[in-house]
Amino acid sequence: MGPLSGVRIVEFAGLGPGPFCGMMLADMGADVIRIDRPVDIAGKSGRVDAFSLGKHDILARNRKTVRLDIRDDANKSAIIDLIKGADALIEGFRPGVMERLGFGPEAILAENPALVYGRMTGWGQTGPLAHLAGHDANYISVNGVLDTIGNKGEKPAIPPTLVGDMGGGAMFLAFGILAGILHARSTGEGQVVDAAIVDGSAVLSSIVWAFKGTLGWGPHGTNLVDGGPHFYDTYACLDGKYISVGAIEPQFYAIVMDKLGLTDDPDFKVQMNPGAWQQQKAKLAEIFKNQPQAHWAELFADTDGCVWPVLTPDEALEHPHIAERETYITKDGVTQPAPAPRFSKTPAQVRSLAGEGETDIEAVLKSWENK
């Protein structure tokens, strides 16, 4: 059932990081109940059309959904009864919304003093920007993270919502909720977890700040681990595909030089000379573009050269390592990432897809009473 079997969480459905946090906890066996809007509130779809993904809404897997209009006072007592039996709550509204609905931390913690009240926002519950809208790119812009991403001399490169929403937001909320539950179980005291994407993604940049204080950190695309060196970058191949090189350590770098026939090339004798990196990159680019990706993958196979093909998501499914570890799985026709990390005693699993757990609040309350 997973290492979090027995943990009960109420999730007020939203978009992006909140659902991803709920998915992570549910993957690990937590009993997560989503409170979502009735279908007639959002134009007969239950949600904005662009996000009506049906069973392909991977972020909604592994949990039951109760559809209630949380603005209707008639539903309030039942929702509070549900929260009374929970270990934690997840909500992702702007600051003040839950308070206006009657489900704010002060009111809810009075009903369930041991509850961990998880709040997921972009800007946080406090600060001059807390009341404003925003998206992933905005949060990582203001905290300096986006400026660290991109090629030399080019504009910052906006990544998918992995850095902000999922990494800096959802994963920090999940971590905070679990830390809060441990505290509550030892003390009986619940608390509010203020998880802000602007904060969490800043923590993800800790290595940048470590470099800034020691080796220094220059403009994006000029540093040791951001695509600056010739030995840490991607290169185009003959077939238009790409290869990644990550040979930082001298012994790994030596393997790359040997495989490419550059061991005695005076232009590559010194690895850590930032002034020569662009010239060295240009020479490597000329070499890599003369053969297709498969050639380079085979040349560096079973070596510590740290040279690997850049695969598309579909191609990754066929890679022997990814396939053997079942990093991606297919359930009922839906291919998706498998739960992670792996546990030796309490393995996590995908038990159900989005839409398979529709239920009503009375049934949930009854099931929780019987456990």
Image: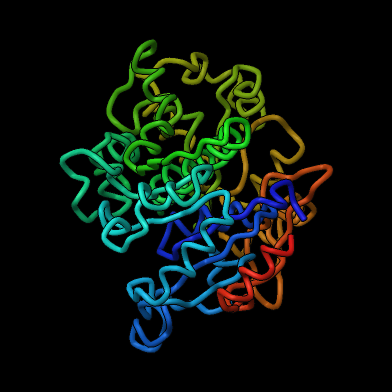
Q: Residue at x 39, y 42 (%)?
A: 195
- Observer-nearest of 242 and 132: 132
In the rendered view of the protein, which quadrant contains the N terminus? bottom right
- Outermost residue, right side: 345
What percent of the width, then of the height, locates residue 161? 40, 53
Position of 339 with respect to 165 (left or right) is: right
In the rendered view of the protein, which quadrant contains the C terminus? bottom right
The answer to whether residue 205 is above or below residue 370 is above
- Observer-nearest of 133 and 152: 133
Quadrant assignment, res 302? top right
Q: Residue at x 61, y 35 (%)?
A: 182
Quadrant assignment, res 64? bottom right
- Outermost residue, top side: 214
What percent of the width, then of the height, locates residue 16? 42, 59
- Outermost residue, left side: 128
How are the colours assigned in the image?
rainbow
The answer to whether residue 109 is above or below residue 283 is below
The answer to whether residue 30 is above or below residue 213 is below
Q: Residue at x 61, y 66 (%)?
A: 63
Q: Residue at x 42, y 46 (%)?
A: 169
- Observer-nearest of 221 and 164: 164
Q: Is residue 69 visible?
A: yes
Q: Is residue 56 visible?
A: no
What percent of the width, then of the height, locates residue 296? 64, 45
What percent of the width, then of the height, locates residue 308? 62, 43
